Amino acid sequence: MADIDIPESLIELERAAWTEQQAGALTVATAAAVQQAITDHAAATSGASRYQVEAALKKLVRHPAGS
């Protein structure tokens, strides 16, 4: 997968969602906000699909040592 530029705001949003998910408290609003931000970022950048952005973001947040 090519390197995808992910803004810090999107990383922080995913971190918040991941924290909620780990606590068993993920809300629909939080999940929807992350998905919308991922979709918007993918649309605004060339060369990366929403799926690629989401995969890179999750890898960065959930497996930071492997990034």
Image: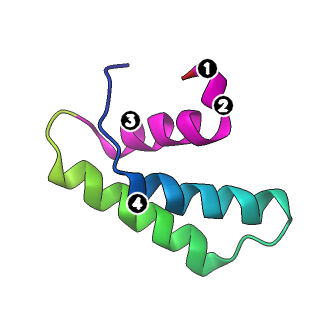
Magenta residues, start to end: 48-66
- The part of the image, by quadrant, that contains residue 27 is bottom right
Quadrant where the C terminus is found in the figure: top right
Q: Earlier in the sequence, mark 1 or mark 3?
A: 3
Depth check: give the residue in front, 50 or 41.
41
Q: Are marks 1 and 2 in contact (CB under 8 Å)?
A: yes
Image side of residue 63 versus residue 53, left or right: right
Q: Where does label 4 land, which residue?
A: 9
The circle on residue 66 is: 1
Choose mark 4 or mark 3, whichever is in front.
4
- For badge 2, the amino acid type reads His
> CA gap, disc 4 to disc 1?
21 Å
Q: Are marks 2 and 4 in contact (CB under 8 Å)?
A: no
- For badge 1, the amino acid type reads Gly
Q: Where does label 2 land, which residue?
A: 63
> CA gap, disc 4 to disc 3?
17 Å
- The image shows residue 19, relative to residue 53, as above or below, that is below
